[in-house]
Amino acid sequence: EVQLVESGGGLVQPGGSLRLSCTVSEFTFRDYAIGWFRQVPGKEREGVSCISSYDGRIYYSDSVKGRFAISSDNAKKTVYLQMNSLKPEDTAVYYCAADHFSPCTIGTGTDYNYWGQGTQVTVSS
């Protein structure tokens, strides 16, 4: 059974940084698309960033471009989301999602079949 486990969330002050990790198991870490999404209660899930292993494509939503960076460590089967210059509006539960297609996509995440349990990120003073 494919499992995705996110970690690294927490409470941070505005302007601070966090690094989220998404470690996958029972998933062929090749020709994959892995995305990060976030959701606030009462709002639609929002795509934040994604990475395609097949061609190295990376995408960011306009709301995080220039502040967040996605990367992968294939040996560790882990994808990271480095989040800098955090703002209160970045507060959400962050999820990673995975599947085998290319290129990766962001949006609401309906292209992905495998999801983690989520990790809370709170940006507040």
Image: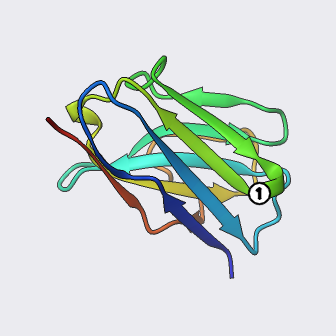
- Give x and y (percent) for residue 43: 22, 49
Left or right for 39, reference 109: left
Q: Amino acid at mark 1?
A: Lys
Left or right for 102, reference 109: right
Colour basis: rainbow
Q: Residue at x 75, y 50 (%)?
A: 101
* Crowd class of label 1 (few under 14; some 14 to 19; many from 20; radius 10 Å): few
Q: Residue furthest left?
A: 125
Q: Residue furthest top?
A: 66
Question: Residue 103 falls in which quadrant of the image?
Answer: top right
Q: Residue at x 85, y 54 (%)?
A: 30
Identify the element where label 1 is drawn: helix
- Give x and y (percent) for residue 75: 83, 54
- Give x and y (percent) for residue 46: 38, 43
Q: Which is nearer the eye, 72 or 32?
A: 72
Q: Is residue 45 visible?
A: no
In the image, residue 78 above or below residue 14: below
Q: Residue at x 26, y 43 (%)?
A: 91
Q: Which is nearer the eye, 55 or 17?
A: 17
Q: Which residue is mark 1?
A: 76
